Image (cartoon, rainbow, N blue to C red):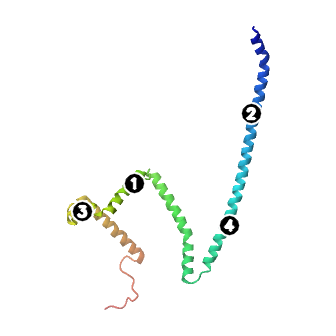
Amino acid sequence: MSFSASRMLLRTPQIGRLAVRHASTTSEAANAASNAASKATTQASQGLSKVSSSAESGISKAAGAATNAMNSVGGRTGQVISFVQSMIPPTVYYGKVGLELARLVARGQKMSPPNVQTFQTYGQNLMSAVKNPSANSPSNPFQAMRNIGSSQLLTAGVVTAEILGFFTVGEMIGRMKLIGYRSSSHDEHH
């Protein structure tokens, strides 16, 4: 065995103790850093909650003052304001219901919103139509009528029938009768 090899064997326990000591100091440093980070996070969240609670109380006070000022208005304006205030909660509720329904339908139909390029294409076409309307419209409207195909006529007929049907059902619901309008005097005949 050479002198350097024997010297290395003698130093091996010292190297091992140094490594253990450095490893323990490293893990202690990591633990200390982790504790400091969690303490800073806790303090930051406490500060944020204090700021948000004070902001909420300030906003609620301002909203209360605005509501009191609106409620003190009388007459027709007060009636309009109270009507609008009474319509806000159902409007918000049905808006959320509509958005959720739209989201479910879109997910069920595997729909996705159009990409940016589609919006740009339609925007460019719209802008060119606005800038130069004569380039997009036919010179003779009668010529355009002659070019209408049977599929377009069929589509127009179906859409017209749908509109007429919805209008008729709406009228029936509005009048609460299937035939005729209500009259104040049934006995008068001319």
Report, in whole angstroms, how far the alpha carbon at label 1 lies from the one at label 4: 43 Å
- Which quadrant does the N terminus fall into? top right
Residue ID for mark 2: 26
Residue at image location 78% in from the left, 18% down from the top: 11
Residue at image location 60% in from the left, 77% down from the top: 70
| Mark 2 surroundings within 10 Å by alpha-carbon count, few (fewer than 14), some (14 through 19), many (20 or more) | few
**Rendered location of residue 159, percent (x, y):** 32, 64
Residue ID for mark 3: 138
Residue ID for mark 4: 58
> Which quadrant of the view contains residue 187?
bottom left
> Which quadrant of the view contains residue 175?
bottom left
Which mark is first along the chain, 3 or 1?
A: 1
Report, in whole angstroms, how far the alpha carbon at label 2 lies from the one at label 1: 57 Å
Label 3 SS? loop
Residue at image location 34% in from the left, 66% down from the top: 162
Report, in whole angstroms, how far the alpha carbon at label 2 lies from the one at label 3: 81 Å
Residue 120 marker: 1
Q: Nearer the viewer, residue 42 or 155?
A: 42
Residue at image location 53% in from the left, 68% down from the top: 91
Label 1 SS? helix
